[in-house]
Structure formats: C-alpha cells, structure tokens
Amino acid sequence: MPELPEVETIKSQLSKDIAGKKILDVEIFLPKIVKVSKQKFKRATVGARIKKIARRAKILIFELDNGWSFLMHLKLTGQLIFNGQKNKHTHVIFRFSDRSHLLFNDLRQFGYIKLVKTADLPGFLEKEKLGPEPLNKDFTLEDFQAILAKKPKTKIKQFLMDPKNIAGIGNIYSDEILFEAGVLPGRPAENLTPSEIKKIFDAAKHILAWAVKLRGTSASDYLDAHGQKGKFLAQLKVYGREGENCVKCEGKIQRLKMNGRSAHFCPICQK
C-alpha cells in the first residue's frame, strides 16, 4: 500500500531520526525478508554509519559509510517505526549505538530488504526500469506527453499505476488524480485531449505534493516512521467511497475492477 507520499514521508522522517547513527546490531527474526544470509547482512551493516537515506519510486535506500547500501520495499503492509514497540509482525530490528532502534514490521510479509554495493546502485535501479519521479521539478508536461504517446492503447489508470511509466503512483493516488482531472479511469491514452493530459499532469503534481504534506494516507496498515497515521485519508474524494455521494455533484461514487485492481470514480464528474 505505501505509495510515493507515504514512502517520501518515511524517508524525510528517518533522515532526521537516524542519519549519521552507527548500527550496533541487527536482529533478524524472519530471514526471508532479508534477501541475503543473516551473516552477510550483519557483516555489511553492523558497525557502519548511515550516511543518508534516499527514495526511488517506492524503494527506500539506506547508504552506509562503508561502501554498502541496503534497500527496503514495504510492499502492501510494511512499516518502519522508529523507537516503536516490538510486536508479532516485527521481523527485523536495527539497533543503534545511541540506544535508539528501528523496527521493520510487515503483516503480509511481502516486503523486503536487499543488500547492494553502493557503487552498484545505479545499475540495480536501472534494471528496475523505473519511470521518472512525478514530483521532480525537471519532470515536465512534455515528458509526460512523450511517455503517454508510447502507450496509446493503455487505460489511463493502468498507465499511471505502472512504475515503468511514472514512479510511485499506486491505486489510491491514481484514483484521486483522475477525479481531480475529471477523466474516467478506463479511457485509453490515445483518446485523451491535450487539455485532459495537462489536467492529469497538473493533478498528479498537486495531489502527490498535498499528500506528502499531510504525511500520506492511512487507508489500511500504513503508519509513518513515528507510528502515526497520515492525514490525507480525510481528503480522499473517490478512493474507498463506493456508493457514497460525490463531493462535487449529486452522483454516487462507483467502483469497477481493472486488471485485478479497483478503480473508484464519479460517472458524472469524470468523462
């Protein structure tokens, strides 16, 4: 579930909470979460300091001062909680030399931690074939139009959710972006007008930045790095509101299945 705003929130918080700290120990309770052996992971991380924390799409990147980095993906139900209380879903604990700690929790156990040489990070991320970051200032309308033109038959919601097109937009924010833009989720890219494409582009910038400011959306298991719920849930106009009144008109929010995912929309406000 954590999408770009949630992962960006966690990155910003942990950059303040743990950057510069020395890793004293790593406790691994569920080995499958860490994609190398316990011994190798601990050899690479224990005793090192965290230089900085970055984000690419929904991936968190922890760069260490010894030439190693580790990457975390929270997938559907992952949580990173600074100084939290261990529970039955805590699978990894990072302990720091100042006695603080960081928990990796994951109810569904789909999340992962990968160990990568820092020098190999560009190649690793290149293999992921991730699209541009939508909130980067250098991501322009012209860039968006060019990517969209390569996928003329793709439905616009599916286009937005594919990280190979645009990085980090998932189910929640694709619904909200398309509602703000007034575009139905099932419209093929080739049928969108230049005006509609600009509205989608502008809505993506606005919705994602707004959600980051409010620390994301706690629609299910998401908590920020301080164990708090994000505040964007109250701002959702269509996601999770099937059968409720539209906030703009007298219509009812509808939901349809699209490639195994749900799309929420207003059939009156979106065309």
Image (cartoon, rainbow, N blue to C red):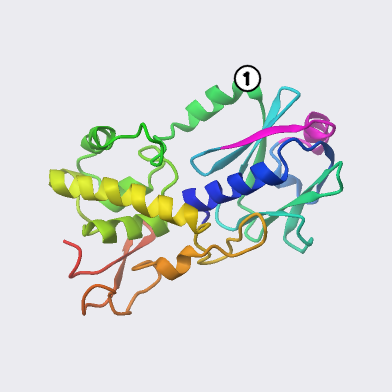
**Left or right: 38 with respect to 196?**
right
172 falls in the magenta region:
no
Q: Residue at x 78, y 62 (%)?
A: 85
151 or 96: which is nearer to us? Answer: 96
Q: Which residue is mark 1?
A: 119
Picture coordinates of residue 77, whole percent (x, y)? 59, 58
45 falls in the magenta region:
yes
Q: Is residue 185 visible?
A: no
Q: Is residue 270 visible?
A: yes
Q: Quadrant of residue 83?
A: bottom right
Q: Residue at x 49, y 51 (%)?
A: 5
Q: Quadrant of residue 134?
A: top left
Instruction: Name which residue type carries label 1.
Output: Ala
Q: Which residues are magenta?
A: 36-54
Q: Secondary structure at mark 1?
A: helix
Q: Residue at x 35, y 51 (%)?
A: 206
